[in-house]
Amino acid sequence: MKKLSMMLICCQLLLSACSDQGSRGSVVTSEEAGIAGGQKVIVDSKLSRMVVLVDAAKISSVGFIRNGREIFPVERILCTGTFITENIVLTAAHCIKAAPFKMRIVYSENSSDKSARHSSVADVFIHEGYVKGSAASANDIALIKIQGKRPSNYSVSTITTMPATSDSFSLLSIGFGLTDNQLDDGGVLRRVMTTGISYDPTSPTFTIDQSAGTGICQGDSGG
């Protein structure tokens, strides 16, 4: 049975995930893949207010000449985040370690929503033990401090301290990732039910069963 070892931080917050993907153009980078076999989260529902969209951008290191001007393409990096205080969002270090020059927290179920509310970022803190490019390793944790406070209708997640009551349990995952490695459909909030196995609050990891072809991947990091 195919299983993936996942990092648990709070409320089953999943920060690391499946294997690396190939490039998918300028909208979502190679570290972004996501919920497969799930459904879109209902707009303005309670679930839609449990996570936020981490919308970052970086300038490509490879440029080109157009009309005599040197141009460096801008890449968007989309991930998921979860409020753990009134102004702190928890996400994965690999989502923001690509040195983005611009970042914001978006409050919408879809990244294409031009009228969506958003917060500017005041500061970013990446775990000092994280190594860039090691999305599946330990310490893949980052904190984003926003300007001001969270919208009142977005929830703050609490630390999970209770052990699982059985060897396996149902797990609801929510994130903005892709539905398939070959599709460019990230930035839409989706949910999926999976099965968690052997959760222990004293351990940094637990296992989820994705053998049925449903589950999460890197783009849902922080969800």
Image: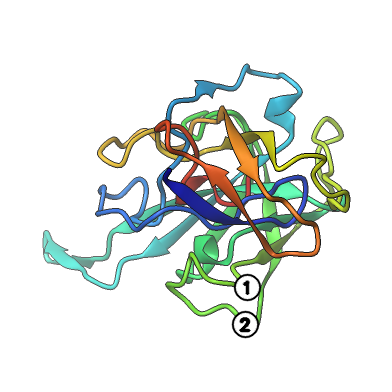
**Which quadrant of the rendered structure holds the C terminus?**
top right
Q: Is residue 87 above or below residue 209?
A: below
Earlier-in-chain disc, 2 versus 1 = 2
Which residue is identified by label 2?
A: 129
Colour scheme used in the picture?
rainbow
User: Which residue occupies 62% across, 73% down?
Assistant: 139
> Circle 1 sits in a helix, a strand or a loop, which is it?
loop
Which residue is identified by label 1?
A: 139
Expressed as whole percent of the image width and height from the top left, the position of residue 16 reads 54, 58
Observer-nearest of 178 and 109: 178
User: Which residue occupies 42% across, 31% down?
Assistant: 212
Q: Are marks 2 and 1 in contact (CB under 8 Å)?
A: yes
* For residue 29, side relative to residue 66 (left or right): right
* For residue 184, side relative to residue 100 (left or right): left
* For residue 100, side relative to residue 51 (left or right): left
Expressed as whole percent of the image width and height from the top left, the position of residue 168 reads 67, 39
Expressed as whole percent of the image width and height from the top left, the position of residue 178 reads 40, 37
